[in-house]
Image (spheres, rainbow, N blue to C red):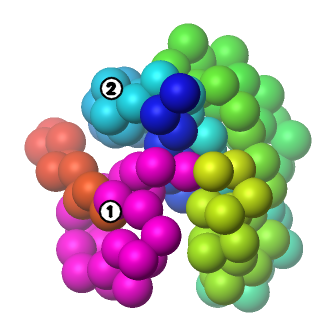
Amino acid sequence: MKRVITYGTYDLLHWGHIRLLKRARALGDYLIVALSTDEINEFKGKKAYHSYEERKLMLEAIRYVDLVIPENDWEQKRGDIVKFDVDVFAIGDDWEGKFDYLEDLCEVVYLPRTDG
């Protein structure tokens, strides 16, 4: 089974998010979404409209998503890739080049953002 992981806050869920999740899922057989917790958003200076639990519930209802895990720490990505035996790390191309350091563990794919 080819496992894919992506990260994000997914607040005020919209069609661009759905499109990204669909394209990420198409890269493998199983999609893991590491969802930013309220605490990490606060640390990053962000405030989500919906709580972590509300955002998690919405993501779990999307057919492309197989598992939602908490993103508690910016540095957890390497550990998640190993723990969940991930083959592909996928994220929006607004992060282009920022996660190349993960290429020793898995394929890194930057997905084009949805216009509009």
Q: Which residues are magenta?
A: 86-107
Residue at which label 2 appears? 26
Residue at the spot 47% in from the left edge and 70% down from the top edge: 105
Depth order, front residue of 53/80: 80
Disc 2 residue crowd, few under 14, some 14–19, many 20+, Cα 10 Å = few
Q: Which mark is residue 108?
A: 1
Residue at the spot 33% in from the left edge and 59% down from the top edge: 107
The type of residue carrying mark 1 is Val
**Residue 22 picture location, percent across and down:** 37, 25
Q: Secondary structure at mark 2?
A: loop
Magenta span includes 5:
no
- Relative to 39, is 2 above or below? above
Distance from the alpha carbon under mark 2 to that under mark 1: 14 Å
Magenta span includes 102:
yes
- Relative to 34, is 26 above or below? above
- Determine whether, in the image, residue 68 is placed left or right of residue 62: right
